[in-house]
């Protein structure tokens, strides 16, 4: 088992990178490159961002500062190992790049992280996965990896401050390399880039960030540091996600979402997954539902199931998310939060109000999803068997929480 998932009360924590956040902070990028002596850049950019002209400002920035660059944009919504290994890595080496500049959502950053972690190893991502499961995730790898600057254009994954990636192999299975070597050296989080997201993308990625923060908060791996980060993330995202999604161009809301994603991602590095992120990859693989949507539809049942052991923390989550409708501890019931999360999904029009069954899910598919679930992780706030997970999946599939 990966050492990250072995219970260790003395596991290190902290922030091993430099972070810029605030309106206009992308202007710091040329200075970062100059200070580090990075003169040749591989721009790894989401093709959707490139298509609508969002990459022009970064290309102009590099040109205006005399920085040579190449562009890698062969990026699928679920980044493919084959694209990383057959296109990305050869391009980096042939161009003799000094650094990866990843611009976009989680897919762009995961692609850059795949290139970075393979580095000079002459191994595939899949081969490295075996090695990474047995090495200290906080110690340097034996081969040279590539440095990375991450610039998020969505408000969701927190990938810019997280030490893991999600990469799909040739069989469609999602691999999750985890190591400090793929933690971006710099995260440049400019809320101005969040202003033009389509409403559905804003909602799905925002829910991903919120779910990460709540999972990190109740995870049994949480400590004082991660809880401080996750609470702040919930305070920022909870009250602002609906107004942000309804009007992304208002700076106050975009800035709150940007900061919330950073804090949630930092908390994730210490506290790791609970049941939602440990079980939602098969939903995206089999039903082609976005990762953020999968997080959102599992959120209410996650809270309901774990409420028996997390009532006090869920009471705090409720009051952080809904500061104008706080409930006294003596009056709080977990179902109050469950109902509000159901309504939140409605307000954000998650999956257009459709159930997993509407997307073609069947009980046979649920069985396949459950088969990939690890029921051995100590991080789950409440012990969860495959049978219990199937019950939760079936209730979500049948629209109980719509």
Image: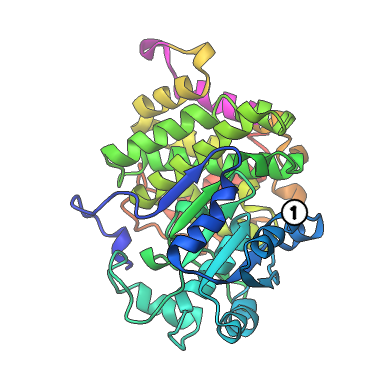
- Quarter of the image that includes the C terminus: top right
As displayed, is residue 263 above or below residue 92?
above
Q: Is residue 289 magenta?
A: no
- Callout 1: 10 Å neighbours few (<14), some, many (20+)? some
Q: Nearer the viewer, residue 306 or 98?
A: 98
Q: Residue at x 45, y 42 (%)?
A: 264
Q: Residue at x 55, y 82 (%)?
A: 96
Mark 1, secondary structure of its residue: loop
Q: Which residues are magenta?
A: 328-344
Q: Is residue 336 magenta?
A: yes
Q: Main secondary structure of the magenta part?
A: helix
User: Is residue 160 toward the left or the right of residue 402 in the image?
Assistant: left
Residue wearing tag 1:
54
Q: Pick out the residue farthest to the right.
A: 52
Q: Nearer the viewer, residue 341 or 14?
A: 14
Query: Residue 333 appears at what percent x and percent y?
Result: 44, 19
Q: Nearer the viewer, residue 4 or 226?
A: 226
Query: Residue 180 appears at what percent x and percent y?
Result: 37, 63
As displayed, is residue 228 above or below residue 138?
above
Query: Residue 263 appears at what percent x and percent y?
Result: 44, 40
User: Is residue 188 toward the left or the right of residue 133 in the image?
Assistant: right
Query: Residue 32 appears at what percent x and percent y?
Result: 49, 57
Q: Residue at x 72, y 58 (%)?
A: 55
């Amino acid at each position: 088992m990966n050492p990250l998932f072995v219970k260790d009360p003395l596991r290190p924590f902290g922030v091993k990178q430099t972070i810029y956040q605030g309106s206009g902070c992308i202007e710091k990028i040329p200075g970062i490159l100059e200070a580090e002596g990075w003169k040749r850049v591989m721009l790894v950019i989401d093709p959707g961002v490139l298509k609508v002209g969002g990459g022009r400002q970064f290309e102009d920035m590099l040109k205006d500062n005399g920085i040579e660059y190449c562009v890698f944009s062969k990026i699928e919504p679920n980044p493919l190992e084959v694209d990383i290994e057959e296109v990305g890595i050869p391009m980096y080496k042939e161009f003799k790049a000094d650094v990866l500049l990843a611009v976009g959502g989680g897919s762009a950053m995961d692609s850059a992280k795949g290139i970075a972690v393979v580095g000079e190893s002459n191994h595939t991502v899949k081969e490295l996965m075996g090695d990474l499961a047995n090495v200290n995730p906080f110690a340097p790898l034996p081969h040279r990896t590539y440095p990375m600057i991450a610039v998020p254009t969505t408000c969701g994954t927190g990938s810019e401050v997280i030490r893991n990636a999600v990469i799909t192999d040739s069989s469609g299975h999602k691999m999750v390399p985890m190591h400090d070597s793929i933690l971006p050296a710099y995260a440049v989080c400019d809320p101005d880039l969040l202003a033009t997201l389509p409403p559905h993308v804003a909602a799905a990625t925002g829910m991903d960030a919120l779910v990460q923060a709540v999972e990190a908060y109740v995870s049994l791996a949480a400590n004082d540091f991660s809880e401080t980060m996750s609470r702040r993330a919930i305070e920022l995202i909870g009250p602002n996600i609906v107004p942000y999604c309804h009007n992304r161009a208002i700076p106050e809301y975009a800035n709150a979402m940007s900061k919330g994603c950073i804090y949630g991602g930092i908390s994730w590095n210490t506290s790791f997954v609970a049941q939602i992120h440990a079980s939602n990859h098969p939903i995206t693989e089999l039903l082609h539902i976005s990762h953020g949507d999968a997080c959102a539809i599992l959120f209410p049942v996650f809270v309901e199931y774990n409420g028996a052991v997390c009532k006090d923390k869920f009471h705090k989550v409720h009051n952080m998310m809904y500061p104008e409708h706080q409930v006294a501890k003596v009056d709080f019931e977990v179902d109050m939060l469950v109902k509000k999360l159901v309504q939140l999904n409605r307000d954000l029009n998650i999956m257009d109000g459709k159930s997993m069954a509407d997307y073609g899910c069947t009980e046979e598919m649920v069985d396949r999803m459950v088969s990939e679930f690890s029921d051995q992780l100590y991080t789950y706030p409440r012990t969860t068997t495959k049978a219990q997970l199937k019950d939760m999946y079936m209730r979500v599939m049948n629209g109980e929480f719509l």
